[in-house]
Image (cartoon, coloured by chain):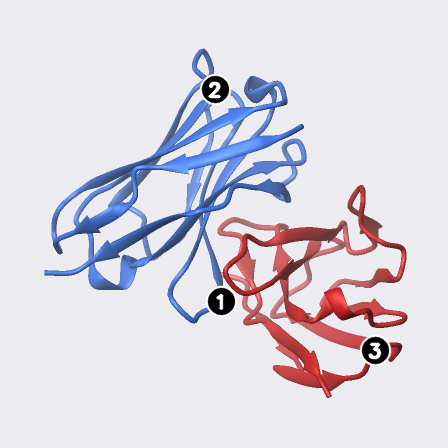
Amino acid sequence: DIQMTQSPSSLSASVGDRVTITCRASQAISNYLAWFQQKPGKAPKSLIYAASSLQSGVPSRFSGSGSGTDFTLTISSLQPEDFATYYCQQYNTYPSTFGPGTKVDIK
Amino acid sequence: QVQLVESGGGVVQPGRSLRLSCAASGFTFSSYDMHWVRQAPGKGLEWVALISFDARNKYYADSVKGRFTIFRDNSENTLSLQMNSLRAEDTAVYYCAKDIGNSGYPDYWGQGSLVTVSS
């Protein structure tokens, strides 16, 4: 199975900060990489698919990049509603696998 | 709009069985692959299973293979997960999710159903 890692595991940031989260796959997955946001007690929300395509309705401050094994999620200007946990997922090969998550909280 | 509503969760003893259902609406159910994803209390997301739009293809996580079965009824717009030989480590919120097509990417999620395996 393909293993996904994320860094950092948590970060503290302020409103308006630029935030970057990294996801790495244990083997090449082309661009079959998605990002999700989850708030406590809520279902995950899909943000980005195919490494860099924005899900409909997602603000443009979210962006994704990467290919192969290394990927990034960037929030260009952090907003109060962005404090949450973020997960990456590879869907190049079944079983699909998620990263362990990155918690973004308020500094 | 897309709606996914899970049901069937509850408390079950180890070794017993439980069936989850997911009622879908707001899209042409029979045209999309569907997923189950779970989340143990305080833990991250774990992909569980996928079924293709026509039910011809099914894929499972190693942790549930041979114990769980995913199936669907396209005439009733319903996705199901039959869970047998349940273990304490199966305790989680189970989410059903619609695929964006047949790519492996879940674009819409239900609110989840809690399954607790405990004696």
Chain holding disc 2: B
Image point (38%, 66%), residue name: B41
Label 3: which residue?
A15
Mark 1 and mark 2: Cα distance apart in space:
28 Å
Give amino acid for label 3: Val
Q: Is residue B74 above or below residue A50?
A: above
Image point (83%, 49%), residue name: A53
Q: Quadrant of residue A87?
A: bottom right
Label 2: which residue?
B77
Give amino acid for label 1: Gly
Q: Please rate how many residues cluster around mark 3, counting C-alpha atoms within 10 Å: few if below 14, some from 14 to 19, many from 20.
A: some
Label 1: which residue?
B44
Image point (49%, 51%), residue name: A95
Chain holding disc 3: A
Q: Quadrant of residue B30?
A: top right
Q: Is residue A3 left or right of residue A56?
A: left
Image chain in blue: B
Image chain in red: A
